[in-house]
Amino acid sequence: MASKNAIKCNSIALIICIALCAPFLSMAVLTCCDLKPVLDACDSYARHGGECVSQDCCFEAMNLKNNLINSHQDYVTACHCIQDAAVKTPNLNHTAFSIIPAGCGIQLPFNFRVDMNCDSL
Ligand SMILES: *[C@@H]1O[C@H](CO)[C@@H](O)[C@H](O)[C@H]1NC(C)=O
């Protein structure tokens, strides 16, 4: 009956996601929900650093910039979401965190810093 349980769990997760994200999806305005793939993919590098920023992290960051951000307001929102996540990340490596955009070859109108001013982009 494992598959039955899996289906049940998946649909619960789906319902939760729809409840959290759906009101925003229809407006095509960026929310912190949209940032979750980037934050998850970059979490490990932001905490541990390393030679190169991971491909997953860069892929998601690139996708964010190229496909999800559509306006100045989206940049402000993304900045706030990233900042909030960074502040809440235990053992954030501030150096590694700040390297992420440049390490991926991505230009954003804000630096990755916990004290960045997201309202003056
Ligand atoms: C933080 O990240 C930088 C850049 O990758 C790395 O050189 C440094 O060793 C890391 N520091 C810690 C404490 O992990």
Image (cartoon, rainbow, N blue to C red):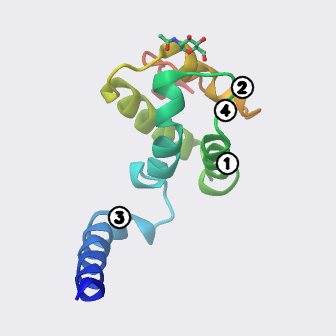
Relative image position of residue 15 (x, y in whole percent):
26, 75
Q: Is residue 50 left or right of residue 47?
A: right
Q: Disc 3 or 2, which lies upstream in sequence? A: 3
Q: What amino acid is at disc 2?
A: Ala
Q: How many marks?
A: 4
Amino acid marked by disc 3: Cys
Splitting the image into four quadrants, where does ligand 1 fall? Answer: top right
Q: Quadrant of the N terminus?
A: bottom left
- The dot on residue 59 is 1
Residue ID at (53%, 45%)? 38
Q: CA distance from mark 4 to mark 1?
A: 15 Å
Give how far across and how far down residue 56 sits, in percent: 62, 46
- Quickly name the residue at label 2: 102
Residue 109 left/right relative to 75: right
Q: Nearer the viewer, mark 3 or mark 1?
A: 1
Is residue 100 or residue 10 the one in the foreground? 10
- Camera-nearest label, 4 or 1: 1
Q: Residues within 10 Å of mark 3 (few under 14, many from 20)?
A: some
How far apart marks 4 and 3 lie (CA) works out to 25 Å
Give the residue pinned by disc 3.
Answer: 21
Gap in angstroms between the C-alphas marked 2 and 1: 13 Å
For marks 4 and 2 on the same chain, the one whose residue lies earlier in the sequence:
2
Residue at 45 percent of width and 34 percent of height: 82
